[in-house]
Image (cartoon, rainbow, N blue to C red):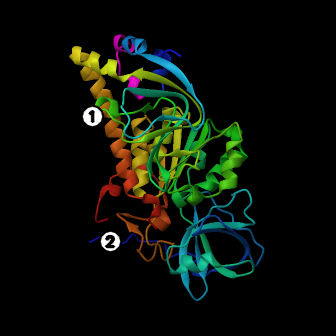
Amino acid sequence: MTTPVTTSSRLPPEAMLPRPFRVIARKEETADTVTLDLEAEDGESLRFMPGQFTMLYVFGIGEVPISISGDPGSPETLVHTVRAVGAVTQAIATLDEGDPVGIRGPYGSGWPMDATEGKDVVVAAGGIGLAPVRPVLLALLADRGRYGAVSLIYGSRTPSDLLFLEELHAWRSRFDVEIEVTVDRADPGWHGDVGVVTSLLPRVAFEPENTVSVVCGPEIMMKVVAAELASRGVGSGSIYVSLERNMKCAIGFCGHCQFGPEFICRDGPVFPYERVADRMRVHAL
Amino acid sequence: MSLQSLRESSELLAKLTNTELELFESLSWEVEVRDDEILFEEGEQADTFYVVIEGKVALEITSPGKRPMIIQTLGPGDLVGLSWLFPPHRWNWRARVIGDTRLVVFDAGEVRRQCQENRDLALEVYQAVADEVASRLHSTRIRLLDLYSLP
């Protein structure tokens, strides 16, 4: 039996109180994924670190943790990219301009932006995992001179499942970032790559001993990418992953997202891979 | 382009000794293939294999009345073709070039013959191709999980 980690009782009471936001724009990314721009009713920006999440509440339906996919340099608009997979996310996917939602947060640890300064940065994303790393890419590109080589390797199920297509094209046209995309299945109309996401790693430039990698996607994908990065000489302390569990309170009280001795909501969701690698091999955890 | 200069990008060529590389050089030539041209068709005799210098090759499966499906794409440094080493030496897939592509073509029949005469060479070649097969099997297993469809 595991023992819940004790949490400070000095959290402000409003930590569980959603702030009213309103949808100001929606964009259908794919058949089951939508990006919503949200604005606080009180006009106050929601500042966040890349990698953090909020608890997004659809009134009368429920609340779910969703990573922030927007630009940390433009906190006046809160952006969430949501894939409809359950009752709440289905409801989120049907929201339209003007609809109200509740927001708690931002919560959790962010991607290690300070640790990336002066380093080569390999961003690896799979499926909906591109959404939580989009703020990293936007931050890196907004201050491009502070980093070494920057690259994104991105794997998706099919070409029609690719997120942020216009942005991917725009980034590809830049000379200071490498963007490599692959899909698992395609017909001959697709001129890109078909194969597993790790097959893209040899294509992008990085010096392993001077590289920080940010990896987000299904857990098996993250393990495979981390193993491939390690085999190419990137230290497991320089590889960061974002984990997901059944988060409910988001402030380390309820224990739903306990992962060994830590709570994903409070101690994560971003972890150095070396800290969680052993636990990611435990079947029953 | 010499095979020596391709060594950095090709895991297959990187595994060969200098002597073996010289032999492979003598059994190879460079070609430029236009976008959408077919390198080989399913069922044809596998008497060549390729290493991509620049561009992309799609391995495809076709069936009557249906659109072909791309199984995998191969890029710079990648080996195109495995069936040349294993009887009955016939291609299992179609290979189609995506975009104008430069490749090194190897005389597979002659490589096989040299391997029969030289067991050390055979060991190196089979080991290098086996590594490639293992790597592709690993990748295929991951893709079979259809990871991105999971919530």
Residue A13 located within the stretch drawn in magenta: no
Q: Amino acid at mark 1?
A: Pro
Dividing the picture into quadrants, the one containing residue A148 is: top right
> In this rendering, would A272 be left or right of A33?
left
Q: Where does residue A243 sit, x and y in percent of width and height? A: 46, 60
Mark 1 crowdedness (10 Å alpha carbons): few <14, some 14-19, many ≥20: few
The foreground one among A77 and A7 is A77
Badge count: 2
The foreground one among B31 and A20 is B31
Q: Amino acid at mark 2?
A: Thr
Mark 2 crowdedness (10 Å alpha carbons): few <14, some 14-19, many ≥20: few
Secondary element under disc 2, as helix, strand or loop, is loop
Residue B12 located within the stretch drawn in magenta: yes
| Residue found at the very far bottom of the displayed protein | A60
What kind of secondary structure does the magenta stretch mostly adopt? Answer: helix
Q: Where does residue B18 sit, x and y in percent of width and height? A: 37, 12
Q: Where does residue A175 sit, x and y in percent of width and height? A: 70, 36
Q: Which mark is residue B88?
A: 1
| Residue found at the very far front of the displayed protein | B64
| Range drawn in magenta | B10-21
Dividing the picture into quadrants, the one containing residue B99 is: top right
Quadrant of the image containing the C terminus of chain A? bottom left
In the displayed structure, A283 sits above or below A192; it is below
Secondary element under disc 1, as helix, strand or loop, is loop
The foreground one among B30 and A216 is B30
Marks 1/2: CA–CA distance: 61 Å
Quadrant of the image containing the N terminus of chain A? bottom left
Residue at position x 52%, y 58% in the image: A127
In the displayed structure, A119 sits above or below B17; it is below
According to the picture, the residue beneath numbered tag 2 turns out to be: A3
Indicate the chain on which mark 1 is placed. B
In the displayed structure, A20 sits above or below A52; it is below
